[in-house]
Each structure stands twice: as C-alpha cells, then as structure tokens.
Amino acid sequence: MKLNQSERLEDLQIGGLKIIQDGEKYCFTSDSAILANFVSAKSSDRCLEIGCGNGVISILVSYKCNPKEIVAFEVQKPAALLADRNVELNNLKDKIKIIHAPIQKFKDHAQPESFDVVFSNPPYMKTNEKSLVGENSSRAISRHEILLSLKELVFCAAKLLKFGGKFCFVHRPERLSEIFAELKLNNLEPKKLLFVSPLMAKPPTAVLIEAKKGAKSGLKVLPTLIANDKDGSYLYTIKKLLGEENG
C-alpha cells in the first residue's frame, strides 16, 4: 500500500498486524494497547468504537476477541480514511466498518440498543485556550473535549448498548467522580476498574473502566498495571499485553 510523505508503516509484531501512522497527526500510545487488552467480547458480539483514530484499537480487538462485527466511528475525515486503509491493509474489511461521522449522529448509521460492547479511548481533557496552545487541530481534537464531551460520550454509549451490554473505556483518574456520576445517570453501572501507572510507586496516570448497562452495584478494582514504558515503546506493550512472546 502506497504511503503519503508524512506516513510510516509500523509492524505491531503480533499476528502479522501492521498499522499506518501519520506523523503529522495524533499517533496512538500505549493506552490503545491497554484498552484493547481490557476489552472482552464473544465471537457472537457486535461491537462499536467511539473515536477510532487510525483504527488500531478496533484492529487489535478484532484480532484478540474475534467478534462478529466492529463498527468504528471517527469524526475527523483524514483519520477515518486512514483507519479504513489500515482495515484494508490487515484484510479486515469483512469484520470492521469505519464510519466518518460524529458519534452524536449515530442514529443515522447504527440502530440504538443493538451493540453488545462499546469501547473508546476518548478525549481526556476539558477545553480551555491555555491547554490548546501549541497543538495542531488534529491532536487538539483527539486530546480535548472540543467535539466530544464526557457527557456526550457516556450518553451515546448507553443509547447504543443492549441491556446487559458493556462499555469499556480509558480516561484520567482525576475525573473519576464525574465519570461515575455520568455512568449512573445513564444506567451504566461501573463493574471493573484498572489503574495504570508508568512506574512503581508513582500515582496512576490512567484508569480503565468497564460499566454494564442495567447491572446491579458491585465494583471490582483490579491490581494496578505498571506500564514501565521508560523507552516509550508501545510496540512491546502490545505484544506483552496481548500475550505473544517477545522477539
């Protein structure tokens, strides 16, 4: 597949998967691999991703869980086009469908309450002018709640899920009180928490949450994951998390 000038081809070193990244846009981090490992789905499940970026999480979830179908929404056209190319590159066109549209317009493309699993690596940060200084528009939209707020994220996930369906996502620990409030408001009960810390004895920098639609209360906090990515290598993290030998 022909690459554009700013693009590079990454070997994910697992299952023969490869991914095209655009160095001028927002590239994925180890959070993507951690979330892909955290998501669980059955072969009969229909899954949906909110904000798929270049498609890496949907591709990894498809490899790991082999669900019946993944529908992946992406609001930024360049990212959606790149995600579609990555799906084609990995011969997954029959398993993953990329939709270029804001998730708030999901009714134009997907039936409400028709998905077993929804997952997302959403924008983490609230928007203010100071926080946006020095970021290009693509990275800003990926990091900040410019086009998708926490409230909208949770609302859309709840509307798309079947009763008993799961919402799996990654966010920042400092926003947990807001997250829990929005989940409860939308009949999504937090069931699992996984904190992620870059190093032992360091505060967590991310938290993964699994919430279940219509479930009874009862929260399981998993042992903290120490990412230890001192060299910034997300490729190693993907192999380690998804259970293949290093090599």
Image (cartoon, grey):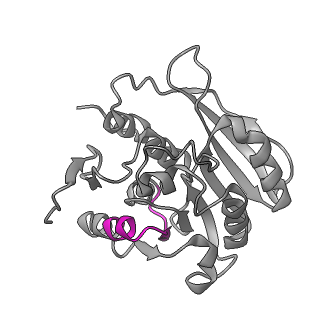
Which image quadrant for residue 57?
bottom left
Left or right, 114 with respect to 84, comes to right
Q: What's the residue at 23%, 48% (across, down)?
A: 10
Which image quadrant for residue 5?
bottom left
- Of the 4 image quadrants, the one containing the C terminus is top left
Q: In the displayed image of the protein, which residue is found farthest to the left?
A: 2
Q: What's the residue at 24%, 52% (across, down)?
A: 16
Left or right, 206 with respect to 198, comes to right
Left or right, 189 with respect to 223, comes to right
Q: Is residue 238 above or below residue 151?
A: above
- Of the 4 image quadrants, the one containing the N terminus is bottom left
Residue 169 percent across, percent down from the top left: 60, 50
Residue 18 percent across, percent down from the top left: 25, 53
Which image quadrant for residue 212?
bottom right
Residue 101 percent across, percent down from the top left: 50, 76
Q: What's the residue at 55%, 63% (across, down)?
A: 50
Q: What's the residue at 20%, 51% (across, down)?
A: 8
Q: In the displayed image of the protein, which residue is found farthest to the bottom?
A: 108
Q: Is residue 15 above or below residue 247?
A: below
Residue 149 percent across, percent down from the top left: 66, 58
- The answer to whether residue 173 is magenta is no
Q: Nearer the viewer, residue 169 or 131?
A: 131
What stretch of residues is rendered in magenta? Answer: 65-83
Q: Is residue 206 above or below residue 215?
A: above
- The answer to whether residue 70 is magenta is yes
